[in-house]
Image (spheres, coloured by chain):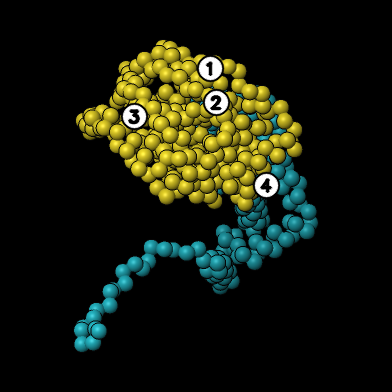
Chain colours: A yellow, B cyan
Amino acid sequence: MELLVQSVSHDFADLAVLRDISFRVAPGEILALVGPSGCGKSTLLAIIGGLLHPQKGRVATIGAPPDGSFNPMTFVFQDFALLPWRSVADNVGFVLEHAPLDASERGNIVADVLRRTGLVEFAHSYPKQLSGGMRQRVGIARALAVRPELLLMDEPFSALDAQTRDLLIEDFVSLMSGNRMGAVYVTHNLEEAARLADRVVVLSRRPARIREIVELPLARESRDALFVAAHQRSLWSLIRDEAAAAAREIADA
Amino acid sequence: MLEGTETVAVRFRGGGFTPLPGRYSAWLAFLIGLAAWQGVCSLGWVSPLFLPSPFRIAVALSQLVISGEIWPHLWASLIRIGGGWLVGTVAGLAIGLAMGLLTLARAVGMPMVSALFPIPKIALLPLLILWLGIGETAKIATIALGVFFPTVIAVYSGVDAVPRNLIRMAQSFEVPTAAIVWKVILPGAMPAILAGFRISAATALLLVVSAEMIGAETGLGAFVLEAGNLMQTDRLLAGVVILSLLGLVIGRAISILERRLLRWR
Ligand SMILES: Nc1ncnc2c1ncn2[C@@H]1O[C@H](COP(=O)(O)OP(=O)(O)O)[C@@H](O)[C@H]1O
Ligand SMILES: [Mg+2]
């Protein structure tokens, strides 16, 4: 399944947020969306995921999702969005309860994704008993449970401390290798983009336009610290002025 | 290494401001209060007509229980509270949910609820008696009205306070609307709903006593009023004790419900 974003523009009342955004996401590709805070990244992701109707342009897919995918485009949220009254296993099961599965099939899927995300021993814990990193593992397990084609991730690790984030990114890289799943990965963290993305869409400050689309060579499993640092720097040079201007705008407001 | 050096211990300044719940002190204070009351009465400082001693109240209470005289009253009050509370709660849940979820219901309901909420519902009892007759229905309707409004407000604000991101999450996984209401919105609003139960139960108790004082032969309110008319202050206060116990039991029941339903908090 390929994703097509075609000339999307969006305003909130008088606030111009997105201007003429177009790009493609190839099957299995991780595309990072970077840009200064408040430029419209979350808005764009909500539009891609069908949670917000764009005022202009459209979002489309090419090719049917494979059989067995319950929700081809699946969000992973910055604030995890877990139901606090459900255990880990039941939070994951929640998104399968309306799928055409019987209880034992559902239980098998839940057990499988909990195993893949290292959550087996926490299956019966409640979200408030978990650290932030563990909570986002639940968010990822829940997303995997519906067998998505494309993950829509809105700063999934930005609420976590640096070490936890590093660990989760490592696990995420190995989780993504060896399957067809792709991702649109929103972040303002350029290091994350340099570590994870096949391509990076660099957005300007609000109203966001595409400044540049940067292609990163090298499979992400083989990227080392030097590679990441170099690409982080070159991305930074692209958005430095924009970020500074955006920060001044916020200070003036 | 520090020999010969004068050292000054840092002065502790972090004390106080951490009151702890006492286990026995409350009971002790209660018993001391009772004993003082009993003492004042036994010494003949006040007329037993105005303030009977705790002992006499206890005797009156046990006589009421043993003779069985109190049960029809208690039963009548319980039926009215139960019926009124149930009707008011079911209606309040439905309307509150609608107002929390639907634009039209909110636009129409909000001003109506704000306008009618402050009316003391007991003032409507005479009107309800005119409409529904002097029987049980008017009393139950008064209680139901009194329960309805706090329930609507609790449910509505509870639904309104459910984090939007949870609803969006469910939508993004294509969870059907009815399941979102049932599995996301209702549990998310449950803390506010149960807090509303506390208020509505207290209102029901208040209203049942008032309604029974206005026009009833049975019920704890009627019993207390009649005891007062006959200047049987020991029986009067025995009735008040029963009402207090009833309030305590209802409060306990809601606490248990909260502990069971809100374990996740
Ligand atoms: N529902 C909304 N209504 C009005 N303004 C909004 C809404 N959502 C976001 N905005 C505004 O749109 C701009 C872009 O927001 P967002 O997409 O969240 O930015 P980013 O994710 O890049 O930080 C911000 O100025 C934000 O305040
Ligand atoms: Mg954002």
Callouts 1 and 3 close, C-beta under 8 Å? no
- In the rendered view, tell whether residue A118 sits above or below residue A96: below
Indicate the chain on which mark 4 is placed: B
Closer to us: B130 or B190: B190
Q: Which residue is mark 2?
A: A73
Residue A183 badge: none
User: Is residue B11 shown left or right of residue A132?
Assistant: left
Mark 2 and mark 3 lie on one chain; the one further toward the N terminus is 3
Callouts 1 and 2 close, C-beta under 8 Å? yes
How far apart are the two marked residues, 1 and 3, measured between alpha carbons? 24 Å
Local crowd at mark 4 within 10 Å, few (<14), some, or many (≥20)? many
Q: Which residue is mark 4?
A: B220
Q: Position of residue A137 (x, y in %)?
A: 53, 43
Q: Does residue B250 appear in the picture of this structure?
A: no
Quarter-wise, where is residue B89 in the image?
top right
Q: Residue at the spot x=36%, y=24% of the render?
A: A213
Disc 4 marks which amino acid?
Leu
Q: Which residue is mark 3?
A: A35
